[in-house]
Amino acid sequence: MSTNLDGEIGDLLQRLQDKLEERDAAQAVNTPQIPRSPRSGLGGEYISELTPPTGTMFFKRETHTILDQEWIYSENPSLRMLLAMLIWRVDVYTYVTNAMPNDPFFSEKNGSILVVFVHSGMVGNAGPGTCDTTLRVECLAESAIIPQAQLPPQDSGVPAGRRILNYTISYEERLSMFNNGGNGVFDFYARYKEDFSRRNSEQISRVIPNGCELGVRTPTKSDEYLKIAGVSIFHTADPKGFPAYFDLRANVVCAIGGFKNMAHS
C-alpha cells in the first residue's frame, strides 16, 4: 500500500525465487518459475485518509495477511503445474455512523455500519494461456450486511499507450461519527485514492451475492509481478449482524485452448 512496502515485497519475492531455483536445481525438478522482470503497477497518486481522529468511538481498524508468499499449483494431481505466486494483505476499517449501535432507534436515525477492505500485495502468474487470479471477500454473517461496491469499477481502465491501462480507485464518503463518550458528534470525511497501471493485463472487479471480487487477468504468461489493488465496501443498517464473519479466498484459473488449470486457496 506504500512505495516502501511494494519494494520490500518485491525484494522478498526475488529472494524466494532464487531459493526455489536452487532447490529445484539440486533436486533436478523442472518446475515452472515466476517471472523475474521488474514489477509493474507502481506510481501515481496515493491518498489514504480512512482513520478518524483519536478518541473516535465505534471505529476499528485491523490488518490481516491472507496469503504470504503462497505458491499456487494446479489442482490436477497428474500435472503439478505452478500457476501463481500470491501475497495478499487487507486493511479492514469498520465505522458506525449516524447512531450509536446500542440505540433502540438505530434504523430510524439512519444508523449504518460500514466495512471497508483495502487490498494490497503482489501476484506473479506463471500458468499457460489466459490466467484469472481472483480474490473473493464474502460475508458469512446471517444478517443484512450487503456488498456496496468494488473499486475500481469493472472496465474502467483508461488506455495509455500500447497494452497499458490506467486505473483509479477513488472513494470518499462523509461519515457522522461520535466522540466524547458519545456526547459529541462530528463529520469525518473518509477518503482513499490510488492510481495504478496494468501492462499486458486488466483489473477484475465484481460485486457478487454476499460479496466482492477483485483480481488480475493476464492474456499470456506474465513477465512481471503485478500489483494487487482494490477496495471492497460493505454496509448494513442492522447492528445485530456484528460481529460479522467474512470468508477471503483466492482462485486461479489458467486456460489455453479448451484446457484449464485451476487452483484454490
Image: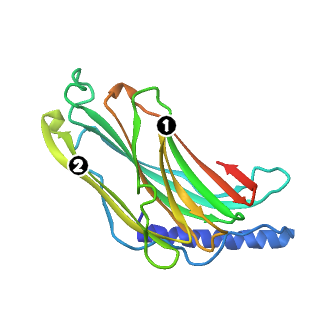
**What's the amino acid at mark 2?**
Thr
The label shown at residue 209 is: 1
Q: Is residue 53 visible?
A: no
Residue 59 percent coordinates (x, y): 29, 42
Using the image as rendered, state which of residue 202 and residue 244 is in the foreground. 202
Using the image as rendered, state which of residue 10 and residue 238 is in the foreground. 238
- Is residue 38 depicted above or below 154 in this figure? below
Q: Is residue 185 left or right of residue 70?
A: left
In space, the residues marked 1 and 2 are separated at their CA atoms by: 35 Å
Q: Is residue 203 left or right of residue 255?
A: left
Residue for badge 2: 54
Q: Nearer the viewer, mark 1 or mark 2?
A: 1
Q: Quadrant of residue 129?
A: bottom right
Residue furthest out toward the left = 184
- Is residue 139 depicted above or below 90 in this figure? above
Q: Is residue 67 left or right of residue 158?
A: right
Label 1 environment density (alpha carbons within 10 Å; few <14, some 14–19, many ≥20): few
Q: Are marks 1 and 2 in contact (CB under 8 Å)?
A: no
Residue 126 percent coordinates (x, y): 68, 66
Residue furthest out toward the top = 104
Rendered residue at 63%/74% (across/down) = 223
Task: Report helix, strand or loop for mark 2.
Answer: loop
Residue 121 percent coordinates (x, y): 51, 61
